[in-house]
Amino acid sequence: MADQVVLLDFWPSPFGMRLRIALAEKGVQYEYKDEDLRNKSPLLLQSNPVHKKIPVLIHNGKAVSESLIAVQYIDEVWKDKAPLLPSDPHLRAQARFWADYVDKKMYEIGRKVWTTKGEEQDAAKKEFLECISVLEGELGDKPYFGGKTFGFVDVALIPFYTWLSVYEKFGNFSVEAEHPKFIAWAKRCLEKESVSKSIPDQQKVYDFVLEMRKKLGIE
């Protein structure tokens, strides 16, 4: 019996993009369902009753929530193609550490950059660029975070590149000017079809955030 795979997602979500990229890397066909987060579907509420959040991967009727957990699940189930996590236990632990670092830092700091002003925004910008600096240090001279091949940390981090113009325009700074190695890594990832076809254009995300700011009453 063929696998039935459904992805409950919301197109600008960097967390959902992780699953889209992982599924594309593995060549898995799936049904994509874009959720209205103000009017969540019964399927989403039933599939993720604890957090009630996207993304949710539904594989043969069984739901997997939380993006990094779902990416690891995808890697374990469809293990014959494009492994995302290394086989060495220590390297796997390192990859999970850095993916967790991305999870704990990028979204919340980035959100502060486009939702705050003055000193609070200045502090968020500083912290955001420090975070990029730390990640750039871990990348070193490797083409990808895992080494020569695109892997788990790359999948966790590259979706935030789609939000970069949001952070830069509202924060009035340039990541490329300060961290060219990070941007070179991002462009290398975008050369992969699994990435470029799975993530939206930066301008589209920026336009979405402009609307969001209006709704939040941020001028």
Image: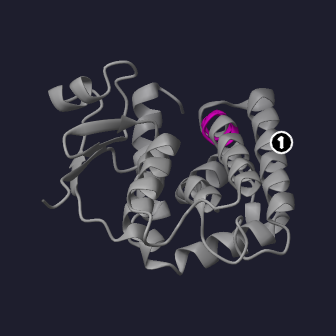
Location of residue 71 with respect to 190 vertically, above or below: above
Location of residue 193 with respect to 160 vertically, above or below: below
Q: Which region shows up in magenta?
A: 105-112
Q: How is the image coloured?
A: one colour
**Which residue corresponds to the image point at 79% horizontal and 55% vertical from the top-left?**
135
Q: Residues within 10 Å of mark 1 (few under 14, many from 20)?
A: few
Residue 70 location (% of width, % of height): 43, 45
The answer to whether residue 149 shows anywhere in this view is yes
Q: Quadrant of the N terminus?
A: bottom left
Location of residue 50 with respect to 7 vertically, above or below: above
Left or right of 181 in this view: 1: left
Which residue is tagged 1? 126
Main secondary structure along the magenta-highlighted residues? helix
Residue 139 location (% of width, % of height): 79, 64
Left or right of 6 in this view: 77: right
Check if residue 11 falls in the magenta segment: no
Check if residue 111 falls in the magenta segment: yes
The answer to whether residue 39 shows anywhere in this view is no
Total residue callouts? 1
